[in-house]
Image (cartoon, rainbow, N blue to C red):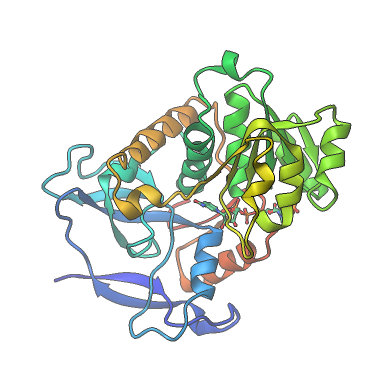
């Protein structure tokens, strides 16, 4: 059996420690069933990577491989695969239950994979899957908005809390495309400029009171609120701003309980978005992630959607993973950071 190179960790160490990411060799897997084997060309780092690394206690016997974004080329396919062929270029975010993309080859179920865009660089493509799937599912599944009916969305308001991060800069673009009025939050001149450039109609500062700022813009309430930073921190503002019968979606979770009774008089809807739900539970609609990525590819190749890549490290190595993790841990990312073997 052939071996492949992988990068992982056995314990949670500071990024300044050389052992925080180590290169090692393990058997190259063989695809069966719906799995495809992908030669990874580029990957990205998301807050989930830093969270899983920090949460790894006690030390593991074998290294854990993380990474949940990939652009690559198909090396081999399982016997039930119908959507792809060897040689196809693909992009995907992957499954929370399986080893990640920080390795030379990676197995993934075809039903959560899309054909890669053809007009973007490897790094621009790897920046996209996880954040676009999250933003798409939040807006067009959990909020039940339609990307194809801008007439129906005209005049509807969306507040994106954390507009310049990876998910926010995708959500803002998609909501703008769908015809909503988008108010996004950002706190620094560069994140404010980035957010406006990605389709926000107005920007408010998440380090100051959101309620008074949104009202000052002329919106007493907001129809849809997408929370992408810290639900506990922004909960009271969300309760105050949501319109009667409005919809709130959070992707971040909460450290202390939130009080859903606060939404009763307004009969507002609250939903979670977890990008991994479909693959984690292998839901019957898991193939919708393939369909979403195909739509995202079309939008990127038609130049209607922009990759949110802002920082590239070459090649995929322990040092470059450490550098990319440090950027994400700063909580000041604008768009996405990618590590790539191909410029
Ligand atoms: N459930 C899911 O499926 C899912 C999927 C993806 C991500 N997530 C979660 O969603 C969150 C965002 O992910 P991401 O990749 O977009 O993050 P990110 O790129 O790391 O976000 C960085 C941005 O956060 C902003 N920020 C910092 N403090 C803030 C605050 N108090 N309020 C609002 N914004 C603040 C910063 O803006 P300024 O510099 O302007 O302050 C910065 O631009 C993370 O918690 C991540 O784990 C969940």
- Examine the rendering and report whether any part of residue 164 can be seen: no
301 to the left or right of 236:
left
| Residue situated in front as seen by the camera: 184 or 166 | 184
Residue 164 location (% of width, % of height): 68, 46
160 to the left or right of 47:
right
- Examine the rendering and report whether any part of residue 157 can be seen: yes
Residue displayed at 30% across by 48% down? 73
Residue 246 location (% of width, % of height): 64, 32
Residue 5 location (% of width, % of height): 32, 70
Residue displayed at 29% across by 50% down? 282
- Indicate the quadrant containing the N terminus: top left, top right, bottom left or bottom right: bottom left
Residue displayed at 52% across by 39% down? 138
| Residue situated in front as seen by the camera: 97 or 9 | 97
Question: From what the image shows, is residue 181 above or below residue 186?
Answer: above
Residue displayed at 43% across by 78% down? 9
Residue 241: name its quadrant. top right
Question: From what the image shows, is residue 308 above or below residue 317?
Answer: above
88 to the left or right of 307:
left
| Residue situated in front as seen by the camera: 205 or 278 | 278
Question: From what the image shows, is residue 106 above or below residue 82?
Answer: below
Question: From what the image shows, is residue 27 above or below residue 327?
Answer: below
Residue 78 location (% of width, % of height): 15, 50
């Amino acid at each position: 059996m052939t071996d492949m190179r992988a990068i992982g960790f056995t314990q949670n160490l500071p990024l300044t420690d050389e052992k925080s990411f180590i290169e090692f060799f393990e058997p190259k897997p063989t695809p069966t069933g719906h799995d495809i084997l992908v030669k990874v060309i580029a990957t990205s780092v998301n807050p989930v990577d830093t969270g899983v690394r920090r949460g790894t206690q006690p030390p593991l016997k074998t290294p854990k491989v993380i990474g949940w974004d990939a652009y690559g080329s198909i090396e081999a396919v399982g016997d039930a695969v119908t959507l792809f062929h060897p040689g196809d270029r693909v992009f995907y975010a992957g499954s929370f239950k399986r080893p990640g993309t920080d390795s030379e080859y990676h197995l993934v179920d075809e039903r959560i994979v899309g054909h890669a865009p053809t007009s973007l660089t490897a790094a621009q493509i790897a920046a996209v899957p996880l954040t676009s799937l999250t933003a798409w599912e939040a807006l067009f599944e959990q909020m039940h908005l339609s990307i194809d009916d801008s007439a129906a969305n005209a005049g509807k308001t969306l507040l994106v809390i954390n507009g310049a991060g990876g998910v926010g800069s995708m959500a803002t673009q998609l909501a703008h495309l769908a015809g909503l009025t988008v108010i996004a939050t950002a706190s620094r001149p560069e994140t404010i400029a980035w957010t406006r450039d990605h389709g926000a109609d107005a920007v408010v500062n998440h380090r100051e009171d959101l309620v008074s700022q949104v009202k000052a813009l002329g919106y007493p309430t907001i129809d849809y609120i997408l929370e992408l930073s810290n639900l506990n921190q922004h909960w009271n503002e969300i309760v105050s701003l949501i319109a009667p019968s409005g919809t709130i979606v959070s992707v971040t979770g909460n450290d202390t309980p939130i009080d859903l009774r606060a939404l009763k008089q307004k009969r507002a809807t609250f939903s979670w978005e977890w990008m991994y739900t479909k693959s984690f539970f292998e839901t019957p609609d898991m193939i919708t992630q393939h369909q979403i990525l195909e739509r995202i590819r079309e939008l990127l190749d038609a130049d209607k959607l922009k990759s949110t890549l802002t920082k590239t490290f070459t090649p995929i190595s322990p040092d470059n993973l450490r550098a990319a993790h440090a950027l994400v841990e700063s909580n000041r990312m604008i768009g996405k950071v990618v590590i790539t073997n191909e410029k």
